[in-house]
Amino acid sequence: MVSSKTSGVDGRCHLRSIHKPNADVAIAIISLALGAIFIYAGTDKLRDFLVFADSIAAFAIVPEKLINLMALGLPPFEVIAGLMIALPVGRRIGSLSIALCSVMFMLALSSALMRGLTLDCGCFGTGTPSRARMWLEMCLDVFICSGALYVYLDVNPHRYREQA
Amino acid sequence: MKNLPECLRSIVVGRPSALGEESPLKRRFFRDVASVSILMLAGLVVGLGINRLTKAPLPLVYQSPEERFSASLATLISTPPLNLLPPTRIQLEQFRSAVQDRAAIILDARPSVFFKDGHVPGALNLARDNFTRDFQRLVPILKLAEEKPIIVYCSGGDCHDSRLVANALLVLGFSNVSVFTGGWDAWSAAKLPVSMGGAT
């Protein structure tokens, strides 16, 4: 079941359920793909916290005292979010986590791009720093964020509420 | 009738006119954000736990690569490397013949993660990040082949790791040390042989 968003007579947003098996399959595929990407990205960062901490420091936007805490907390968070979005039971929180994470990466990348920095984002694995790679990761973040928001809005528990 | 963007806007912005005072969507959204925050804390707890189990745990306060290197070097020598002559630089052709003829000890100064993903055949990993531990591991090999020149490389381009490691080796008494400035980028761009796997 998926939902279509409409407004009721009271002016509030109501989510009407419509049976669309194809859309259900699409949601499942998007969720699994996003889950796989985030599990991969998280486990890759878990291999070496220090490399990821250096990637965060290169952005020069996080206070020094928080860099290592972020480097330690973000990879497991990504893995957990990836697992949650892949499982129907945790899909809503998982998708919102992934969307917020992508927004954070996008903000960090755009800030670095605007300041003319060339660095390794560290968002989806490590590599040689390059502007082209930064733009590519930015595009990937946009796609991931859109996909995660789409999943989040679809799995909202109020979607079964019929319009009056 | 409101369309999807309007509803989305209502959920995020929370305009009373669109959502009403008791909007369940708005409440649900903020409850979900609170759940995500709890998930972040859980991630941090797991990360701290994993960090404690690793061989070289990350300290809670960040140290820059330069600070880490200085601290690492300070454990090996009593004085910092002052007024050092820069090590000799070599180009790809010289480096390639040294690798092929096994005429030099090749040292990879990149972090072990990158080394495992691919390195110059026969290279040893003396990571700038992990200098003290790697150096102590490699001392027997380096001492045995003392007469051989040592060539250090890192990622290439603007990377400083090879220069830092070469300088440290000069301080530690190795005289014939040079740096391959092209580094891994130049080696892999030339499609030369590559070895994979753990620290040698």
Image (cartoon, coloured by chain):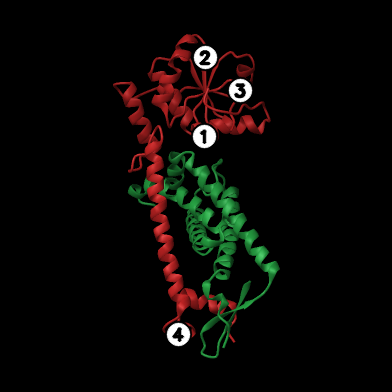
Chain colours: A green, B red
The quarter of the picture where the C terminus of chain A appears is bottom right
Instruction: Check if mark 4's residue and mark 2's residue have beta carbons within 8 Å.
Output: no
Q: Is residue B121 above or below residue A136?
A: above
Hey, what amino acid is under mark 3? Pro
Residue drawn where x is 57% and y is 77% of the image: A160
Residue drawn where x is 55% and y is 44% of the image: A125
Residue topped by disc 4: B20
Badges 2 and 1, same chain: yes
Residue topped by disc 2: B149
Foreground: disc 3 or disc 1? 1
How packed mark 1 is, by other alpha carbons closer than 10 Å (few <14, some 14-19, many 20 or more), is: some
Badges 4 and 3, same chain: yes
Q: Which mark is residue A106?
A: none
Badges 4 and 2, same chain: yes
The quarter of the picture where the N terminus of chain A appears is bottom right
The residues bearing labels 4 and 1 have C-alpha atoms spaced at a distance of: 53 Å
Residue B177 location (% of width, % of height) = 48, 18
In the rendered structure, the answer to whether residue A146 lies left or right of residue B192 reads left
Badges 3 and 2, same chain: yes
Hey, what amino acid is under mark 4? Gly
As helix, strand or loop, the secondary structure at mark 3 comes to loop
Residue A15 location (% of width, % of height) = 57, 79
The residues bearing labels 4 and 2 have C-alpha atoms spaced at a distance of: 77 Å
Mark 3 — on which chain does it sit?
B
